[in-house]
Amino acid sequence: MAESNRSDHTSRQLRMLSQALDSGRLGPVRRLINTLSPAEIGHLLESLPPGKREVVWGLVEPEDDGEVLLHVGDEVREALIADMDPDELVAAVEDLDIDDLADLVDDLPEQVTEEILRSMDRENRDRLEQVLSYPEDTAGRLMNPDLVTVRADVTVDVVLRYLRLRGELPEHTDHLYVVSRRRQYLGRVSLAALVTHEPSTPINELIDDEQPAIPVDMDAVQVANLFSDRDWLSAPVVDGNNILLGRITIDDVVDIIREQAEHQAMASAGLDEEEDLFSPVWRAMRRRLLWLTINLGTAFLAASVVGQFQDTIDQLVALAVLMPIVAGMGGNAGTQVLALMVRGIALRQVGMHNVVVLLWKEVRLALLNGVVLGSLLGVVVLLWFGKPMLSLVIGMAMTANMLFAALAGVLIPLTLKRAGFDPALASSIFLTTVTDVLGFFTFLGLATLLLI
């Protein structure tokens, strides 16, 4: 229900924005934009065609430009950055947090990057260079080095006076991190504990050392899984010597989870989740053509199987009518299994340790569904064509192809994952090939043996 309400709200915003743009009155557009968060503005920009997008982008408050750039896809961001002059870009991103700035650096012109580095103080420049030194999609690239550390041998009163002296805390600060003299991570102290204990209480009595620190080289998806499984709001990041380097907060993890969901949804169709909805036709064509060409090749493979049974089809035209049913139902059943497998692999729920049990479950389920649907289809074919043997053949073929689909749905993504390929990107094309080729072969082969 909440998701539906958000969707309706976004639709209303888009409709109001489009109406205001069409009327040529920019005042209402500016007022609407000023009521939105940077993330909402980014979503609206991605939902607008290029002409209207340029107008809206020009009305965004300059202090929000950097945050908005963080909330649009790579292709849209590239287009927005191309329309900004270097001074605008420097002003837009120079006040971003270090981890957010690291996300944008690769997309900025070299001249702008150099200007940003020159404008930063030595400490923040070193922090940015440290974050950029780690590979993408790791905890090191995800972390923010801006955090508050305290020593274990001081009291609550000392820490509170230190915080008042600082005047402000980094965003999303829920804990302070306790470190040794060598900056090794010892544990954390919640802000709630600081304000509810006596000023004379030693910090070492309040340390929570149950939360493990995240290794700096941990994969970003694993980080997201940890946050999801353990309901963390933030977590410390350490190197191999347990030296505290930074922290990861829930807002960054939500971005990872959303990107993973978008990747699975888009990759299954051979698309890039960063593609602009309104990208130029020629650019979109180049991206999609390879995938469609591969599918064309697999279609020829299925056609060649059908061609081997041309004489059989000539003698019994009903086979041509019924062939798509067998292949289509197999494809649908395989897609269900494939969706579960890709999701399970992404969440680290599926692996070689449980594949046999999972495979046995899907085989039994496929056989049961195959028998039920095959029997139902057999009855329909009997009433339609009045041929009992044809009814038997299609029922057997349906059951067999449902079994093939289940085997393919389980084994294809696992095999691709083991070979180092993305299961979400490549699995569906192989699944379609298996269900089409084996579905046609089984149906026409049985028809040749039993009917001709």
Image (cartoon, rainbow, N blue to C red):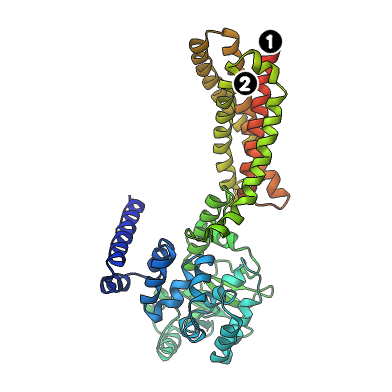
Q: In the figure, is residue 157 to the left or right of 101?
A: left
Residue located at (73% from left, 49% from top): 419
Q: In the depicted view, which residue is nearer to us: 170 or 183? A: 170
Determine whether 170 is above or below 336 in the image.
below
230 to the left or right of 297: left
Placement of 243 over or under 391, stated as above or below? below
User: Residue 397 has which mark?
Assistant: 2
Mark 2 Cα-neighbour bin, 10 Å: few <14, some 14–19, many ≥20: many
* Residue 374 in which image quadrant: top right
Do residues under tags 1 and 2 come within 8 Å of each other at their CB atoms?
no
1 or 2: tag closer to the N-terminus: 2
Is residue 357 visible in the rendered structure shown here?
A: no
Between 123 and 116, the one nearer to me in the picture:
116
Q: How far apart are marks 1 and 2 (CA)?
A: 16 Å
Q: Residue 201 carries which label?
A: none
Q: Nearer the viewer, residue 77 or 364?
A: 77
Query: Compared with residue 352, is residue 47 higher up or lower down, i.e. above or below?
Result: below
Q: Which amino acid does label 2 sit on?
A: Ala
Q: Where is residue 156 in the image (x, y as percent from the top left)?
A: 44, 83
Q: Name the residue under label 1.
A: 452
Q: Position of residue 139 (x, y in %)?
A: 60, 68
Kindly identify the residue that appears in the image at 50 percent across and 65 percent down. 73
Location of residue 96 in the rendering, given as x and y in whole percent from the top left corner: 48, 80
